[in-house]
Amino acid sequence: MSTVDARGVASGARWLQARFLLPKVLVIGMQDTQTSPVLAATTPGNLTQFEYLALNSPLNLSDGHARQPLTPGQSRVVDELPELWADAVKRPVEEIERQACRTYFEMLGQHSYPADDGRVLSCYSSSVAMEIFARSLATAADAIALVHPTFDNIPDILRGVGLRLVPLEEDVLHGGDLPVELLRSVGSVFVTTPNNPTGRVLSEERLRALAAQCAEHDVVLTLDTSFRGFDTRAHYDHYAVLEASGCRWVVIEDTGKLWPTLELKIGFLVSSTNVGLPLAKIYSDILLGVSPLVLSMVRRFAEDGIGGGLVELHRFIAGNRAILRDRLADVPGVTFTDLDSRVSVERVHLGERLGLDVWSALREHNVFALPCQQFHWARPEEGAHSLRVALSRSPSAVAQAAEALRSVLLAR
């Protein structure tokens, strides 16, 4: 590790400690340029804290945000920003928002989304939408069933408002009807589809059956579809299924994973007419609305997606996944957990190696991925031997990071 890189990591660790008030023992481990037994024995605060350490690295394959180069079509949208600004100043925000919603939802096959009665709330991000949902649910319930594994900011947000979490294993979720005793014990069932990090998609048949069960037991069915855009198997009309079921439901959508827009994004919080939760009130406690400029940009990126950009994105992610798998194919003990995944992240099972140790060794190459313990929020040990690698990067960055990972793994 070069002196410059070491200073950068140490500086990042100090900044991270100041921002998140991390325990000093963890930050000392992060500053050490060798694999640290202190670090390996310490449980980090959350995955986002790992991701912050990676933000300044050119080989940041840590967070799932889109950081690949703009396509020619997307570059044209960026060139239009002065015109979009001028247009946003002149037109009513409601009109701009309606157009952005229609284009985005229809790009993803969601033609039955509730367009006209205020049931789509635009937020700064999907995490803000989730916070609003969690605070709303906590007024009516004390427990929620949550898919396991999934990204750890979801359980953190839900726990943060006092909800008790009941693990819902993916195999149970996808395998058939949920246990009646589980449905009787919770106020909501929360499903991430496609899931992060596994990429598993709730099929139309399973969604229909799950919604019917939730309707029967008066449980709110909540979907986080932030990675929907990457997988056409998730493009069937969820809203048609949900509306026909009669269940109470909430859906969280997100534009931030699809396009490299420098964190300019929208999270949509969508709900049924009978949801029975104070979503609009709590929304108004937190924000007035979102930028009409960002809404206009989302509309234009979605138009580009409809015109072929989404198909191009799917090819791009598939290409990066092939690069990673090819570079690691002959490394002893390494397997790929989610062979059918199409989302923009990839889990790598490391055999007997510990993910946290490999993460620490990769830092010496200024390469960052995510150890998977925290995805397994109920039983972290189940993710101890895996890394999650983000694929929304340039192919050259994926190839360089994969070579570094290969070198680290062959040395262990």
Image (spheres, rainbow, N blue to C red):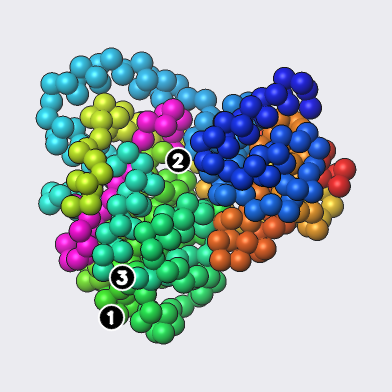
Q: Is residue 345 above or below residue 178?
A: above
Q: Kindly identify the amino acid type of the residue bearing the numbered disc 3.
A: Ala
x, y percent for residue 71? 47, 25
Nearer-N-terminus badge (1/3): 3
User: Is 401 displayed left or right of 167 in the figure?
Assistant: right
x, y percent for residue 277? 22, 62
Residue matched to label 1: 216
**For the residues bearing labels 1 and 3, Cβ distance under 8 angstroms:** no
Crowding near pointer 1: few (<14 within 10 Å), some, many (20+)? few
x, y percent for residue 287? 24, 40
Q: Main secondary structure of the magenta part?
A: loop
Residue 259 in magenta? yes
**Numbered tag placed on residue 257 in the rendering:** 2
Report which quarter residue 57 is drawn in: top right
Q: Kindly identify the amino acid type of the residue bearing the numbered disc 1.
A: Glu
Give me the C-alpha separation between circle 1 and circle 3: 17 Å
